[in-house]
Amino acid sequence: MQPSVRYGVCVLVLAVSRIFAQSTPPPGTIDGATDPASIPDIVAFRLFFGALAETPPVALAAAPSPKLVGKLLPLNLNESDTTTLVAAVRGWQARVSPPDSTGGAAAPVDLDLVTKPVVDALRTSMTERGFASLLAYVRSEKRRMRRVPVPMTGHTH
């Protein structure tokens, strides 16, 4: 290879690597890969519910999609607990992204405040074994999660 071609390839590789390189996370970021215990359970549940949420949103009573059923298999839940969890996730999704009837931007939602009553309801409506399995799974997934602080916008003081 000629020197000018080698130089061009080197510059291209460096340019592309910078594009794909991860930037430094913002201050306050908690990386579950290095410190999973620092991710609060409520945040882990919020991220888990978000991963289960179906796009576009599905009616509460609709049967779960095969994709959703596949995501729930590792939890090893019985049919009743699975139905309860799917309904809870769909209800959570409706609360975190409500339709805006005014045509403008929807008001910001505190996702952790929306998530807490859903988790509390699951704790009482699922079987003890089912909720224990859900909790253990969500906690085990913290190592794959990252909590990034996001400033709330759209508030007037």
Image: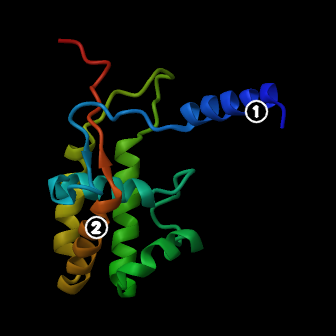
Foreground pick, 14 / 137: 14
Three-letter amino acid code of the residue under disc 2: Val
Look at 43% across and 75% down and name the residue there: 72
Front label number (2 vs 1): 1
Query: Which residue is drawn at the image coordinates 20% and 79% (left, top)?
Result: 132
**Protein image colouring:** rainbow
Where's the N terminus, which quadrant? top right
| Rendered location of residue 98, percent (x, y) | 41, 40
Classify 65 as above or below 9.
Answer: below
Q: Nearer the viewer, residue 103 or 136?
A: 136
Task: Classify 95 as above or below 134.
Answer: above
Task: Please report contact status of discs 2 and 1: CB closer than 8 Å, yes or no.
Answer: no
Per the image, label 1 sits on a secondary structure element best described as helix
Count residues near mark 1 (Cα–Cα under 10 Å), then give few for <14, some for 14-19, many for 20+: few
Q: Quadrant of residue 4?
A: top right
Residue 139: which quarter of the image?
Answer: bottom left
Q: Quadrant of residue 149?
A: top left
Q: Residue 133's x, y, as percent?
A: 26, 80
Number of numbered discs overlaid on the protein picture: 2
Q: Say which residue appears at 23% left-offset and 75% top-offset.
A: 136
Q: Position of residue 68 (x, y in %)?
A: 51, 69
- For this view, does 55 lie left or right of residue 117? right
Q: Position of residue 15 (x, y in %)?
A: 62, 28
Residue 138, numbered label? 2
Residue type, label 1: Arg
- Whether residue 100 can be seen here: yes
The quadrant of the image that shows the C terminus is top left
Looking at the image, is 129 positioned above or below residue 58?
Answer: below
Q: CA distance from mark 2 to mark 1?
A: 49 Å
Report the residue marked by disc 1: 6
Q: Earlier in the sequence, mark 2 or mark 1?
A: 1
